[in-house]
Image (cartoon, helix red, strand yellow):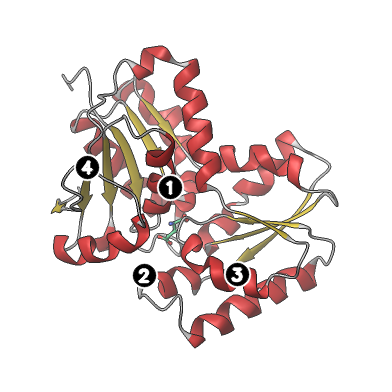
Amino acid sequence: MVNRVGPIGVFDSGYGGLTILRQIHKAMPQYDYLYLGDNARAPYGTRSFDVVYEFTLQAVRYLFGQGCHLVILACNTASAKALRTIQQKDLPHLAPQRRVLGVIRPTVEVVSSISQTRHVGIMATPGTIRSRTYELEIAKLSPDIQVTGEACPMWVPLVENEEYDSPGADYFVRTRIENLLSCDPLIDSVILGCTHYPLLLGKIHQYMPQGVHVIEQGNYVAQSLKDYLERHPEMKEHITTGGTTRFLTTEQAEAFQAKAVVFMGETKLDASQQLVAERIFLK
Ligand code: DGL
């Protein structure tokens, strides 16, 4: 690993991380970004710990090999199941000067200032819910908050298959929200703990009772990263500032390009405004 400078790496199992990249890019358009979506092996949300860890480590190694000194796991499932092990076990010998950050901690940090009732709901993939990472992280920062998790196994497939606006999506969004709030009717804040869910936001707001705050994590993750870079000038020095964004996928590049445009919204990528993806293979 000889590169001394490179882009910020942003990783997700598929398209969801683009909702995070979009916000990071908005907050810091000056940096170069390298996005990697492991679309060939998504979704991760129903996979075991070992598999998510192994796949995520492969992606991190790849991004390090591309010159990234800082990699953001823009995936709650990977942040919940692989981040800690990579930080504690792998980084010290793999690349002690490089950093891998997740999306859960920055999200958890804002919960305390939002919830009045101190009853908070988490909607996420089965893997994230089963890991109990959100509960554990919230307990460290705000032990008075009672957390209830709701696994939403159909939400990522709805988004990946472009069914997020369909009548079928109404059923799955409504039933999960009803189920969560029937488990704890005092919930006043719900964290969307999956980077795919912003695409279901219209329907989530439609079925969430008024007065329940929906916490979308993209902006919080972006602000937290900005703070991090302010506090770590030594890391900032390793990031190139050409204002470009490159996209890598483990599936077909054309399919990725077509869908990624939807996830990136109005984001201005570079002078050409073209979203071009390149296919790679992870191992
Ligand atoms: N985007 C991932 C997350 O935030 C989930 C998608 C998947 O299941 O692969 O958890």
Give the numbered dot on residue 204. Answer: 3
Q: Amino acid at mark 3?
A: Ile
How many residues crowd around disc 3 within 10 Å: few (fewer than 14), some, or many (20 or more)? many
Q: Residue at x 52, y 62 (%)?
A: 125
Check disc 4 and report the residue beneath it.
270
- Residue 272 location (% of width, % of height): 15, 47
Q: Amino acid at mark 1?
A: Ile
> Which numbered disc flags the more N-terminal residue, 1 or 3?
1
- Look at the picture and state if 154 lies above or below 29: below
Instruction: Give the foreground label among 2 and 1.
Output: 1
Q: Amino acid at mark 2?
A: Glu
Instruction: Spot the residue most to the top.
Output: 234
Instruction: Give the foreground label among 2 and 4.
Output: 4
Q: CA separation, marks 2 and 4?
A: 26 Å
Check disc 2 and report the residue beneath it.
160
Viewed as shown, does residue 144 lie left or right of 231?
A: right
Viewed as shown, does residue 155 lie left or right of 118?
A: left
Check disc 1 and report the residue beneath it.
20
Q: Quadrant of the N terminus?
A: top left
Q: CA separation, marks 2 and 1?
A: 16 Å
> Which numbered disc flags the more N-terminal residue, 2 or 4?
2
How many residues crowd around disc 2 within 10 Å: few (fewer than 14), some, or many (20 or more)? some
Q: CA separation, marks 4 and 3?
A: 32 Å
Q: Report if the CB atoms under discs 2 and 4 are less than 8 Å apart.
A: no
> Which numbered disc flags the more N-terminal residue, 4 or 3?
3
Q: Residue at x 23, y 66 (%)?
A: 258
Viewed as shown, does residue 207 lie left or right of 36?
A: right
Instruction: Spot the residue most to the bottom.
Output: 167
- Look at the picture and state if 95 lies above or below 261: above
> Which numbered disc flags the more N-terminal residue, 2 or 1?
1
Q: Amino acid at mark 4?
A: Asp
